Amino acid sequence: PRVLEEDVAPPAPPASPETDGGDDDDAAAPAPAVADDKDGAAVAALLQARKKTYEAATGVARVRLGFRLEATRRQLAGVAGFSEAQIDGCFEDGTAPGRPKACRETPAGFPRGFANARARTCWLSALAQALWHDPGFRAAFDAALATTETREATKPPPPRSPAAKVDALIRCWAAFHKDEGILKADALAEAFGDVADPASGYGDAAEAYCALRSALDQSDSIELREVGNGLRYAPPTPTERAPSFADVWRDLGPVFDLEGGTLVAFDLQWPPLDAPSVRALVLACGEAPDGYALSSLICYHHSTRHYVVFVRVDGSFLYFNDLHHDAAHQHLSLDAVSALCGDRFLQPRLALHGRAV
């Protein structure tokens, strides 16, 4: 994949309109959390800054900034869940839009999503959805819980300890099995707090996966240690072009003991990419060796520091975004996932290959 081009990917909201001249590489700049921008003032400032820069430009620069402005609008709607009316108000006169108005409740007939009231637990809810929807891991974890009684399940463990992480996943699992009510990642956020940024509470989905793997390995339960042993991990080296996952499996398999894993996570540490490169990387992740298939794809939106996840269910992919429910983008083919990710700059961060069923 190509490295991000500034005229394609919109950057994070600036601290003030004056900071956004359109020439700096601000795609990696920190964006305010939704919880920290209660009235949407930063969103309004972003659109007004883009509008002023666009109106002042001429020629090719104006065309380029027009595409950039439109991409920003699409992502505010598709990722954060602002309505067209809210975005139009920001764009016309700088009116702060307030909270996103998109549907946060999961409609009947769809698998449940997580609540994320403070907009800081997406890294954990995305991972939990990936684990729950992988048939191999789900069966192994259910079997382990059914055949053993562990210290983690019977005694409150020390905060943020390995046992606390396992206990939090067990409680999350019980909520999944109830098949009713709102899913929350609060217990996971507390247990995994030691791998999150202490100031913001934000964490990385790949680090959470590795922390869970380590916690299961240290469990009192032999069965849970076996579950942990089935979680494999490998960090492919970023390349200029979309990698061949056949080559990735061949080269990294012996080094990281990938063969035989229940779930194999590839940590995709690419810098921010442009839209064509995001699409190419998504399609590359779909390549798996015999006996495995792409189980889920956890993606990261750099501009808002937000994680989403696509999970395979019955041959197609469901899309989970814990900021809002997107009913229009469900039961997707991998090609459709690739197109959506490119359109919204949802860059693959963790590709999980599971046992083919």
Image (cartoon, rainbow, N blue to C red):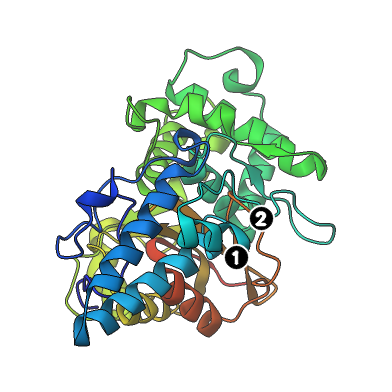
**252 versus 201 height, above or below:** below
Which numbered tag is attached to residue 224? none
Counting from the top left corner in percent of width and height, residue 2 is at 21, 78
Q: Nearer the viewer, residue 198 or 76?
A: 76
Quadrant in which residue 144 is drawn: top right
Residue located at (44% from left, 62% from top): 260
Q: Position of residue 169 (x, y in %)?
A: 58, 35
On the image, the x and y values in percent for residue 343 come to: 45, 76
Residue that label 2 marks: 102
Element type at marker 2? loop
Q: Is residue 146 above or below residue 270?
A: above
Dot 2: few (<14), some (14–19), or many (≥20) neighbours within 10 Å? Answer: some
**Label 2 to label 1, Cα distance in Å?**
10 Å
- Above or below 293: residue 214: above
From the viewer's perspective, tell me whether residue 328 is left or right of residue 298: right
* Mark 1, residue position: 84
Looking at the rendered structure, the kind of residue marked 2 is Ala
**Sequence-first disc among 2 and 1:** 1
* Quadrant housing the C terminus: bottom right
Given the image, on which type of amino acid does mark 1 rest?
Answer: Glu
Around disc 1, counting alpha carbons within 10 Å, would you say few (fewer than 14), some (14 to 19), or many (20 or more)?
some
User: In the image, what residue occupies the spot 44% across and 43% down?
Assistant: 41
Q: Residue drawn 32% across and 53% down?
A: 12
Question: Which residue is depicted at the point 44% across and 21% down?
Answer: 160
Visible in this render: residue 245?
no
Q: Are marks 2 and 1 in contact (CB under 8 Å)?
A: no
Circle nearer the viewer, 2 or 1: 1
